Amino acid sequence: MLNPVMNNTKWDELRLEMHALTPPPAWSTVSTAGYDHGPDREWFYHFKEGGYDDIVHVDIQVETPGQRELVRSVLRKVHVPGEEISEGFRVFGYLQDGQGAEYI
């Protein structure tokens, strides 16, 4: 069973902070229906298209060590459930029963 760990307010905070970065990092999402979207760099309109209710997780891809540090700083500011991955960061929208997550 999937348990929500993000709400629309937190998704909007994340979206606006990522949109403000220059250049904005690429992102991709996995939906509750198993659909993959991305990669995409357009955070302002594309990321919120269709709402947030079906986002299992979003992967934020970073290209340089400097961008990784900048994105990490933004994620700490927004305080979201996620983890660091080799490509960048994964922010969880839902967790499986028994699955834990740290807050970035």
Image (cartoon, helix red, strand yellow):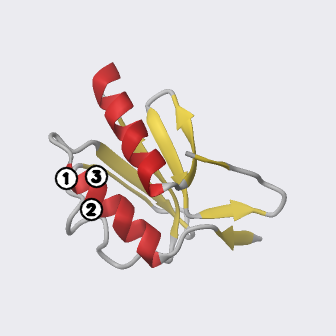
- Residue 26 or residue 11, whichever sits in front: 11
Q: Quadrant of the N terminus?
A: bottom right
**Kind of residue at badge 1:** Ala
Instruction: Examine the rendering and report whether any part of residue 56 can be seen.
Output: yes
Is 41 above or below relative to 3? Answer: above
* Element marked by disc 3: helix
> Which residue is depicted at the point 47% across and 62% down?
35
Task: Name the residue that disc number 2 marks.
Answer: 16
Q: Which residue is tagged 3?
A: 18
Residue, far top: 65
Judge from the rendering whether residue 100 lies leftward or rightward of residue 19; answer left or right. right
Marks 2 and 3: CB-CB under 8 Å? yes
Q: Quadrant of residue 65?
A: top left
Inter-mark Cα distance, 2 to 1:
6 Å
Residue behind mark 1: 20
- Can residue 64 be seen in the rendering of this structure? no
| Residue 84: percent from left, percent from top | 54, 35
Q: Are marks 2 and 1 in contact (CB under 8 Å)?
A: yes
As helix, strand or loop, the secondary structure at mark 1 comes to: helix
Residue 75, horizontal then vertical, whole percent:
44, 47
Q: Residue at x 57, y 69 (%)?
A: 32
* Residue 56 falls in image quadrant: bottom right
Q: CA distance from mark 2 to mark 3?
A: 5 Å
Q: CA distance from mark 1 to mark 3?
A: 5 Å
Residue type of the residue flagged with mark 3: Met
**How many neighbours does mark 1 have within 10 angstroms: few (below 14), some (14-19), or many (20 or more)?**
few
Rendered residue at 81%/63% (across/down):
97
Q: Amino acid at mark 2?
A: Leu
**Which residue sits at x=51%, y=52%?**
91
- Secondary structure beneath dot 2 equals helix
